[in-house]
Amino acid sequence: MQTPPGAPTSSLFAIRDTPHSGRAVFATSFIPADTLLLRADDLTLSVLLREYRREVCGQCFGYEYGRDLRIRDAAVGFSFCSEECQTAWRAEQSEIGVQAWTKVEGLVKGRSKEDDDMVDVDLPRPREKEIQESWAGAKAQASLIVVARQGERDRLQPSTNGANGAAPGVQVTKQHRKALQKALLQPVSPDVMTFCVSGLLWKYNKPTEWERVMALAKDATPYHNTPDLKAFVNAYLHLLAILPLPLLPLCTPETLFLLSSRDSHNSFGIRSLEDDGSEFFGYGCWPAASYFNHSCGPNVEKRRVGRVWEFRAAGEVEEGEELCITYLSGEERKLSRGKRAVVLKRNWGFACGCERCEGI
């Protein structure tokens, strides 16, 4: 098969199609125990849960075990363990990105408890038709908001109002302004906003690498429940109303849904004590790392080192053997077969048939 964009390459393994598990990673030669297989440093989007923003570095994800970090950048809503991390974060986000995070923080600050209401985790996932209808339902209001923002652009660039033969500016009415204000009054979900902004900025700052995300396995029903879907639609309208103008063309239902559909089954948790810690700080998408399939008895161990994931052979691996990681956290690995099955089905959408589960 042709190597997908962003897929890892190595003399130790190859990406191949499988009959039942999509693409997978297979050893192309004997691999000794503890061999470094891959260092995945291609983080695309990431979400640090807002409740941990004071304790976890926004750049390297360093954790101070409950203590506030030394540097708090209140304008953008992130904290950093060092000036180097703060500088690196701002450079990576770009000037437009810093402006975007500042706008989002201004909206979210003081309203972050709006998404703290308990949601029944057993609610069914919205099906494709409901997803399509929800996004389509926002289309009319979104078009009005875009016109209102276009009027803002015209005020900033008077030459577009007919001067020098340029096309005349748009006519912004009370209806347009009302649609924008209505969007800002909707409940805010800070972590959903973070997901959307992170993905949009990655596409804006690294357009040539967008194919890395496009090539990942997709989930046609990525939203956990109907409130989750509603939070994403609200975030879309919020962002249309506040993002810096250069980002508006990227803020579309198609792009936001694509980010969710690719991230759904390809994200890695950001936890304390690397991957085995009990505290879940957030998650991120590293496309190169997403080609490893799951096993409850993995032959590959993963370890997060800052913003990079390292993958090493857990033991000797024979040529032709599939290289698998576990999608379970440290505590989840200890669960019974039945309980593991429930976790994997709920979080990842599949029934595990690995050797450990089948008793082979």
Image (cartoon, grey):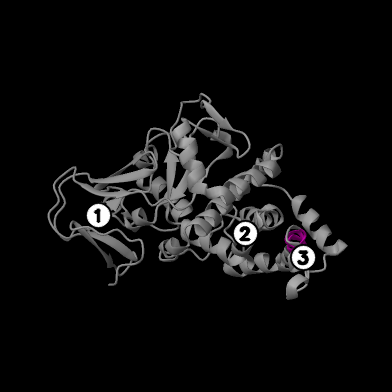
- The quadrant of the rendering that contains the N terminus is bottom left
Callout 3 amino acid: Leu
Residue located at (46% from left, 30% from top): 82
Specify the label residue 309 is tagged with. Answer: none
Where's residue 32, x and y in %? Answer: 13, 47
How packed mark 1 is, by other alpha carbons closer than 10 Å (few <14, some 14-19, many 20 or more), is many
Where's residue 19, x and y in %? Answer: 30, 70
Residue located at (36% from left, 44% from top): 308
Q: Nearer the viewer, residue 242 or 169?
A: 169
Left or right: residue 223 versus residue 242 is left
Number of the front mark, 2 or 3:
2
| 153 falls in the magenta region | yes
How packed mark 2 is, by other alpha carbons closer than 10 Å (few <14, some 14-19, many 20 or more), is few
Mark 2–mark 3 distance (CA, rounded to whole Å): 18 Å
Q: Are marks 2 and 3 in contact (CB under 8 Å)?
A: no
Task: Kindly identify which residue carries mark 2.
Answer: 246
Specify the label residue 323 is tagged with. Answer: 1
Mark 1–mark 3 distance (CA, rounded to whole Å): 50 Å
Which of marks 3 and 2 precedes in the sequence?
A: 3
Q: Is residue 65 above or below residue 61?
A: above
Looking at the rendered structure, the secondary structure element under dot 3 is helix
Start-end of magenta stretch: 148-155
Which of marks 3 and 1 precedes in the sequence?
A: 3
Q: Nearer the viewer, residue 102 or 113?
A: 102
Kindly indicate the quadrant of the structure image that contains residue 301. Answer: top left
Q: Main secondary structure of the magenta part?
A: helix
Q: Is residue 72 above or below residue 115?
A: above
Specify the label residue 144 is tagged with. Answer: 3
Where's residue 275, x and y in %? Answer: 37, 39
Q: Is residue 37 above or below residue 76?
A: below
Callout 1 amino acid: Leu
Residue located at (51% from left, 23% from top): 67
